[in-house]
Image: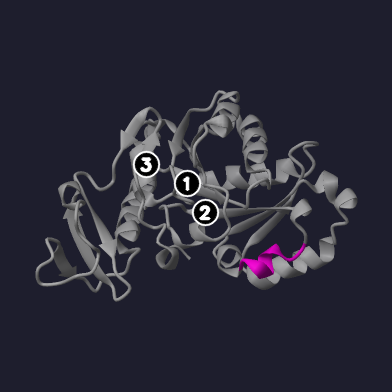
Amino acid sequence: MCQECGCSSPGPYKVGDKSIDPHGHGHTHTLPDGTVMTHSHDDHQGHSHEPSHAHPHQILNLNTGILSGNDRLAEQNRGAFKALNVLALNVVSSPGAGKTTLLTQTLKELKGRRRCAVIVGDLATDNDAARLRTTGAPVVQIATGTLCHLEAGMVAEAMKQLDLRALDLLIIENVGNLVCPASFDLGEAVRVVAHSVTEGEDKPLKYPPMFHSADVVIVTKTDMAVAAGFDRELALKNIRQAAPHAKIFELSAKTGDGLKAWCDHLVALTAKA
């Protein structure tokens, strides 16, 4: 997970046309023992990362978890959504599971029924954002750089570019990844995991933290199930084992089969937001 691999320390990223350096004029390194070392960019030349009495770094011993800062920002996001009666979704999946096509068709189906906007996370391109803008919904792109997931602070920055008072539903399309996004609360009310029939039946068992965190699991690309040799009953069994509390939808964004039930669910949730 991110707290082990180190990718929880974001570098510069972009929200729309705005470049953001989360570290300002300095940054931190977290040592294996939990020690946090802070230094400015001026300290980079001629030093090692080993702490010592002669080291120019300031060493702070903190007992807070590596995700505590993110969790605080997530609670702030959640409070803003609740205050403005906006339902926020965090939509996650592996790459190629069909998130963007699903969300494009969802936005079209909800047009005139609910006021929607999208925040899109991707490493570099704005291809997904461009596709989603064809629906007429407001879309804010976050280019995460090297970071394999969205964080609450990124979402907070993107929220500044939206009129939340004019929304019923905010959809956050996370970076395609079934590992690291499981650890990061964005302040969403509902976490949605999309699982394509082309991925096989065992993804829920291979990535249990992500599926266990899901409020909704959507089985996508059902029109390809026969061609993919998809074992529906086994897949549903595995989803229920990993996420017994999650509501399950099966649909094809291409044919529209099952899409109405999913969108009706969102309409009902926004009525309670």
Residue 3: assigned label: none
Distance from the alpha carbon under mark 1 to that under mark 3: 11 Å
Q: Nearer the viewer, residue 232 or 128?
A: 128
Q: Nearer the viewer, mark 1 or mark 3?
A: 1
Mark 2 Cα shell of 10 Å, populated few (<14), some (14-19), many (≥20) = some
- Residue 212: x and y, percent? 58, 67
Q: Secondary structure at mark 3?
A: loop
Mark 1 lies on residue? 88
Mark 2 lies on residue? 190
Mark 3 lies on residue? 84
Q: Nearer the viewer, residue 235 or 175?
A: 175
Q: Residue at x 54, y 64 (%)?
A: 213
Q: Is residue 26 left or right of residue 163?
A: left
Q: Residue at x 50, y 56 (%)?
A: 181
- Cβ–Cβ below 8 Å for labels 1 and 3? no
Asked whether residue 123 is drawn in magenta, I would say no
- Residue 272: x and y, percent? 50, 49
Number of marks present in the image shown: 3
Mark 3 Cα shell of 10 Å, populated few (<14), some (14-19), many (≥20) = some
